[in-house]
Image (spheres, rainbow, N blue to C red):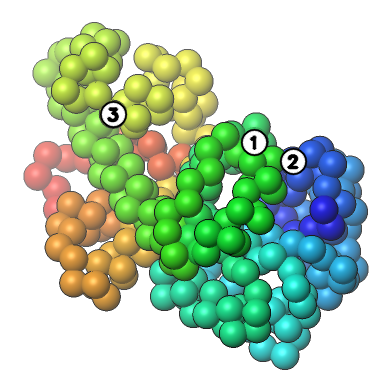
Amino acid sequence: MRVGFIGLGNMGLPMALNLVRAGHDVAGWDLQATAMQGFAAGGGRCAGDMADALDGAAAVVTMLPAGTHVRTAYLGAAGIIAAAPGALLIDASTIDVATARAVAAAAAAAGLDMLDAPVSGGVAGAAAATLTFMVGGSAAGFARAEPLLRAMSKNVVHAGAAGAGQAAKICNNMMLGINMLATAEAFVLADRLGLDRQKLFDIARVSSGQSWALSSYCPVPGPLPGSPANRDYAPGFAAALMLKDLSLAQQAAAESGAATPLGAAAAQLYQALVAAGQGGRDFSAVFPWLAAMPRGEVV
């Protein structure tokens, strides 16, 4: 399939290259020259500009930083909706639900299938094609998109109508952020009580304290050799990105009237972590930050 891929950043680049490896004709474009160079080095075909990437595309995939970028890319006289007639549109960005629904409505008015398809799995999952796609949009659009999405992922789930993919992503990551904080706090307490970290890990992962944050992404050095904690918290999923998702969850909670006190507390704590200069580290770096915090300190 001829695919235009817009946004070749940390996530978009390996995703686009996985489409190339799957045999698709992918024209990639990004504002950053280094991203374009990385795409070319991986065997991708670099477009001269966004219009060039969209020319003749049967499908368009976008991976952009925020809702404002998605609106700019899709809407307007020179936007994707106007410039890619007949194309299947897939936005893999993590953005606010309202923007996802607004852009999907504009696409539908132009007779186009559009899906919001944010991902879980981080940079490692993007590189290994083991992402999970959470997809919002019509059943017909999902059926058209599924072969493309499967080339970049391990799991593809149709969550519902337009905006449902974004809703699933922010709910999932709110749970993850809360779970990581709880796991980190437990290890901080264990350290103060003299409990061996490996012993707590071995007990909790087969007991009621078990979670993905513990068993697959343990925030303390030692128990899981492959976790960021054993690489000085080099980011698989940066703390700044966790703050973004928690902030989107709080925006959605305010708009829908949902009570999310733990989500609000998690957002506040990650805001403080980022403000402390830790935004570029993995989100599990909340552990050493909490460990260094004096008891009773108000964040």
Tell how many labels: 3
Please give the name of the residue rendered at 16% of the width and 23% of the height, measured from the top-left corner.
Answer: 208
Check the image and name the residue furthest to the front: 140
Check the image and name the residue furthest to the bottom: 77
The label number, if any, that marks residue 143 in the structure image: none
Around disc 1, counting alpha carbons within 10 Å, would you say few (fewer than 14), some (14 to 19), or many (20 or more)?
many
Please give the name of the residue rendered at 29% of the width and 45% of the height, measured from the top-left corner.
Answer: 175
Please give the name of the residue rendered at 81% of the width and 70% of the height, measured from the top-left corner.
Answer: 54
**Alpha carbon distance from label 2 to label 1:** 7 Å
Q: Which residue is mark 3?
A: 211
Say what secondary structure mark 1 lies in. Answer: loop
Residue 123 appears at what percent x and percent y?
59, 40
Q: Which residue is mark 1?
A: 129
The quadrant holding residue 19 is: top right
The quadrant holding residue 111 is: bottom right
Q: Which residue is mark 2?
A: 18
**Alpha carbon distance from label 2 to label 3:** 30 Å
> In the picture shown, does residue 76 fall above or below 196?
below
> In the picture shown, does residue 237 fall above or below 218?
below
Q: What is the three-letter code of the residue carrying label 3?
A: Ser
Mark toward the viewer: 1 or 3: 1
Q: What is the three-letter code of the residue carrying label 1?
A: Ala
Q: What is the three-letter code of the residue carrying label 2?
A: Asn
Residue 191 appears at what percent x and percent y?
20, 20
